[in-house]
Structure formats: C-alpha cells, structure tokens
Amino acid sequence: MALFRIATFNVNSIRSRMPALMRWLNDNRVNLLCLQETKVQDAEFDPSPFHERGYSIVFRGQKATAGVAIASLEPLEDVRIGFGDGEDPDDGPRLIRGRLGDLLVINTYVPQGKSLEHPDYAYKLRFFRRIRALLERESSPGDPVLWVGDLNVAPTDIDVTHPENKRDHVCFHEDVKRAFEEVRQWGLVDVFRKHRPGEGEFSFFDYRVKDSLARNIGWRIDHILATKSLADASLDSWVDRLPRSWEKPSDHTPVVAVFDR
DNA sequence: ATGGTAGTAGAACTA
C-alpha cells in the first residue's frame, strides 16, 4: 500500500507566503501541492525553496493577480497551461494541469466574479463550462482524474456560515452552484465531503471578519474532487486550519486528501 | 458583518 497525499492551497501571494508555505511543506510532505493566487510573474517566481525540498514545480503567473503552480515530488508529465480550447482568454494564470502516469491533475483558480452584474461573473460561469468541456475532451470518468483548487464556490448551505444572507453572492448564487454541479456531474466526487460530511468545515476565513478563525466564520471554496475510482481509494481528507493561525497567514488554508494507490 | 484587512501597488483596486 502506497500513500499518495495531495493538497490545495490558495496562498494569496507566494512571495509573501513563502516562509509559511515552506514551514507547512516541511511538516506535510505531500506528493502534490496545488497552489493558487501566486501573484507573481514567471520571471520572478523563485523555485529554489521547492527544489531544496525535493520538489519539482511548474507555474504560470502574472503581475498582481491570479497565478497557479503545482509542486510535485515526482516530476509532472505532459504539463499544459491554460485551457487550450481556442477560446479567449486561454487563461494560463488560472489553469495548469499535468499527469503522473495515468493520473490527470487539473489545478484551477476559478475567477471570483466580483458581482452578479459584472462581466467577470458571466466569465466565471463560462469558466466552469470550459472545465467540463476540457474533461470531456481530455479524459473519461473511468480514468483517475483530480480537479482541485480555489473554485470560488460553496456548493451547499453547510459550506458557508450564514447561507440565508449569501443567496446573491458570486460564490453562492444558485447559478454558480449549478455551473459547478454541472462539472461535477461529468463524474467527480467531492473527496472532502466523502470523509467530512458535517457542518463548520471551512477553507477560507476573510481577513476582514474579526477573529474569523476562532469564531469559525468562513467558506468552503477550496476543493479536491476526484473521479469515482480514485475517490474510492481515498482514505481521508481534511482542512488544515493551523497555517491560518500563523504569522502573516493567507486568508485561505490548505485542504488535504490521502489516497491509497 | 454593506465594515472590516491584506496584497500589490506606489493610488486605488481586488478578494
């Protein structure tokens, strides 16, 4: 039996977060670490802290916003950046994927959307449709596939603190939940929920909400989904709340899953 | 928590 560990973590600037990120990685030698909101151009991305710890790393970023990366103990194969579907924008800073043998991993930073009326929200809904099309084009529900990242959607009422006053939020509106659900229905299982069905499980704690971590006021918007055969091989999944309590934390905290494969 | 805070900026904007 070989354990395979994966984590997703929106770091909210990898340059600001490098000390905390390396502290976490020292203690959590996950096989795959999918990062979002690196907020750094590729020329200024410093891979050496990952290399020093035995990780290869692939990344695509831009100035100030977005940016994704995947660190891997075994080098990723067939790395692709962006959708590659001919649509505009290709959106490399929000989607990076690669393979480890037969396993396909897709790491996304889904656009937040700003407001229901904003063009970014329509783009967000289209982003989910493009994910579904990518899955249909590149894989099959019978294959081992992981879709992870900051998906900027809380799928159900127990994934936010006060659902009743968030019906018009871009991460909780019925339309965005449906858009996410239509990707999931291609053939993905919410690995975290398989193991943690209860309420009060969050991966994002707004800086602006006083004592959000201690009061457990947050959102579950960072996700690990897997095709059924892979999800069946999962042993556990959890939110690691510890890094959110450290100095200079990200507003998100890692979500981890362990597989036997 | 329709106010807050952190990050990138180097003044507002994004989350």
Image (cartoon, helix red, strand yellow):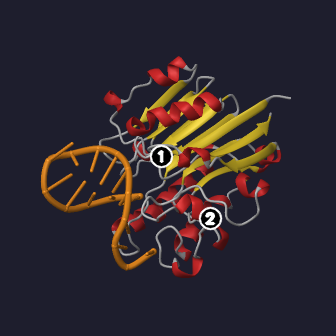
Q: With respect to residue A98, does A246 lie above or below?
A: below
At 38% from the left and 66% from the top, the residue drawn is A114
Q: Disc 2 marks which amino acid?
A: Glu
Image coords of residue B12 (percent x, y): 19, 62
Which SS class for mark 2? Answer: helix
Q: Which mark is residue A222?
A: none
A150 relative position to A146: left or right: left
Q: Residue at x 41, y 67 (%)?
A: A121
Are the two marked residues, 1 and 2, in contact with CB atoms closer than 8 angstroms?
A: no
Quarter of the figure with the N terminus of chain A: top right
Residue A249: mark in rendering:
1
Q: Which residue is tagged 2?
A: A182
> Which residue is more in the foreground, A167 or A19?
A19
- Name the amino acid, label 1: Pro
**Chain letter of disc 1?**
A
Q: Position of residue A35 (x, y in %)?
A: 51, 41
Q: Residues within 10 Å of mark 1 (few under 14, many from 20)?
A: some
